[in-house]
Image (cartoon, rainbow, N blue to C red):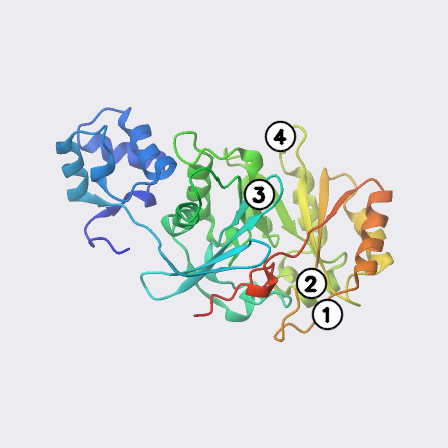
Amino acid sequence: MKGSLDKTDLKELNISELSKLIGSLGKERYRTPQILKWLYSIGVRSFDEMTNLSKKFREELDQISFISELLPLRTEEAKDGTKKFLFQLDDGNRIESVLIPEKQRLTLCVSTQVGCAMGCRFCLTGKKGLKRNLTASEILNQILAARRSLPQDVSITNIVLMGMGEPLANFENTLKALSLMACPDAFKFSSRRITLSTVGLVPEIERLAREKITFQLAISLNATNDETRSRIMPMSHRYPLKELLSVCRRFPLKPRTRITFEYVLLEGVNDSSKDAKELVKILRGIPSKVNLIALNEAPAIPFKRPSDEKVRAFQEILMESGITAIVRASKGSEISAACGQLEAKG
């Protein structure tokens, strides 16, 4: 939703920026958590709904700022309950988010860019190339829009930044959005329920290590040697596996937490018993778990999905070596909502 060019989108402000804006109006510091609650916990769409603020204060806010939102252009639902939301942004670009129901949780997969520059050959998003970064408000408004589609007694429990784009290539906006996801006055998601997935941008992972925001880190690994990884993930030639795994070993983790390594299995490329044994070897010394994802096939993807037997054999080698390995069920593939299938087609 477009706002006036001379007004500030409140959802583009981090906590200190919002506090500064409120202070500029001569208002008390406690108004900041009040407004954060209205914007994110309750999800209001207008200042008139902020009923514990005076009418004069609401009018002052309306003069200098606005509340942005995203409205789904289209919503599709698969037989397994997975929902895919197509959003059209103010500039005409389109993005997608996916809501994934599971037994004990309801996970929203959020996009951070329009398209993606990483070019992973098993992912349809990368075929589109990068159009632009999403703003912090465009990231956050995906959560609010998905939440509005749910019954009042159903809540989103987990957020994964695994949709369209590479989150760490949009570092500042992603971090601003993360801070509000974790803020107890805003969305108040537990740090254990927010996961950021990256292809492995080493300098940005090092920057993450210096941030005070806590969340779960996932690395899209997908190969056990540089030659194979560069073949299926062209950007990985910039950061050799040795360098990537080194920064993972140094990454500060909270007690009883691990780095998740995502491994998309491609038939005849990275799914052999030799690959599994090598994966055990290279992850040694890193508190880790592995998510195994059998490729979601598509005509534009030049790889095939391995058999279920091959996937189980790969998993067993990891587990016998003491690595927690989970085979992730493919959800929403019939509506092109599964991992690697997001294209934001109109």
- Please identify, in this view, whether the residue under mark 3 or under mark 1 is nearer the observer: 1
Identify the residue position indicated by label 1 in the image. 304
Tell me the SS state at disc 2.
loop
Q: Are marks 3 and 1 in contact (CB under 8 Å)?
A: no
Q: Earlier in the sequence, mark 3 or mark 1?
A: 3
In the rendered image, the vertical position of residue 50 relative to residue 150, given as above or below: above
Tell me the SS state at disc 1.
loop
Q: Earlier in the sequence, mark 1 or mark 2?
A: 2
Q: Which kind of residue does numbered mark 1 sit on?
A: Lys
* Other residues around mark 2 within 10 Å, as few (<14) / some (14–19) / many (≥20): many
Identify the residue position indicated by label 3 in the image. 206
Quarter of the rendering occupied by the N terminus: bottom left
Residue at mark 2 to residue at mark 3: CA–CA distance: 29 Å
Identify the residue position indicated by label 4 in the image. 254
Q: Which kind of residue does numbered mark 4 sit on?
A: Lys
Residue 268 horizontal side relative to residue 256, left or right: right
- Please identify, in this view, whether the residue under mark 3 or under mark 4 is nearer the observer: 4
- Please identify, in this view, whether the residue under mark 4 or under mark 1 is nearer the observer: 1
Q: Earlier in the sequence, mark 4 or mark 2?
A: 4
- Please identify, in this view, whether the residue under mark 2 or under mark 3 is nearer the observer: 2
